[in-house]
Image (cartoon, grey):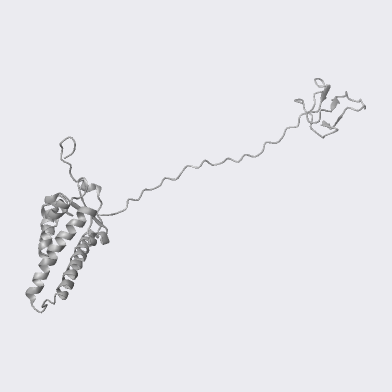
Amino acid sequence: MDEYGDEVYLDFESFPKTESYEIKRTFAYLIDQIIVMLGVLFVALLLSVDLADYTTWLIMLLIAGIFNWIIKSLMEGMRGESIGKGIMGLKVIDAYGKVTVGEALVRNFLEIVPIVLPILDFVIGMAVAQDSRQKLFDSISKTLVIEDIPVMVEEKPRYVPRSVVREPSPKEKVKLDYRRIRVGQCARCEAPYRVLAPGDDSFSGLWNHRCTWCNHLITEDN
């Protein structure tokens, strides 16, 4: 229940499913069961149990199922995944996120009888559950096994403004207006100059509209 008293439901569409989902679930179960079965077999060998009798194997299989139920439920409640699910990239969730140990004990209850009851649990769940990924006891415990698929966030390219290269504008040549400018000082070296009337050959301090001393161009703005 949330703070307003309304029940929260699983949003199945928020979790994508690949074509290999059922294969991952199958291998995850087999990995968990085989690991526990090897542990039980190892203990049986240490205890010198007679393995020639088929009833011994049935008992060992049931013991392995019980241990698988307990171990898997504890791991899913604490980490959200068992060993097999972690290897296959699967996680168990509920509507609020990671499942609790209690929910995991319920959803894995039929693991007590290996192979037979888990297959029955999965087949019935596909027929009656809200989502085809739910087992019957997933539907009862309101849990779901999802694929831990990383979400790829497409990074938008950063806008880099293009620098506009402009051609330098040609400098305009400005001729002196003899009617307005008669005397002045060079803006660079402050040497005095005079604008002479046409035909006057005396020294003016200018040559070709430039300062005779520093070659600075003298325009009407100077």
Q: Could you tell me residue 119's position as x and y percent? A: 12, 62
Front-most of 199 and 182? 182
Q: Could you tell me residue 37's position as x and y percent? A: 17, 69
Q: How many marks?
A: 0
Seen from this angle, which residue lies furthest front?
47
Residue at horizontal 72 percent and vertical 34 percent from the top:
171
Seen from this angle, which residue lies furthest top?
180
Q: Is residue 194 left or right of residue 103?
A: right
Could one spot residue 169 in this view of the protein? yes
Could one spot residue 145 in this view of the protein? no
Front-most of 35 and 183? 35
Q: Could you tell me residue 9's position as x and y percent? A: 17, 44
Quarter of image, res 208: top right
Q: Is residue 59 left or right of residue 174?
A: left
Residue at horizontal 83 percent and vertical 31 percent from the top:
211
Question: Vertically, is 14 above or below 19?
Answer: above
Q: Could you tell me residue 14's position as x and y percent? A: 25, 47
Quarter of the figure that contains the N terminus: top left
Quarter of image, res 63: bottom left
Residue at horizontal 84 percent and vertical 28 percent from the top:
191
Quarter of the figure that contains the C terminus: top right
Seen from this angle, which residue lies furthest left?
55
Seen from this angle, which residue lies furthest right?
201
Q: Is residue 165 left or right of residue 24?
A: right
Question: Vertically, is 33 above or below 135?
Answer: below
Quarter of image, res 72: bottom left
Front-most of 131 and 103? 103
Front-most of 194 and 190? 190
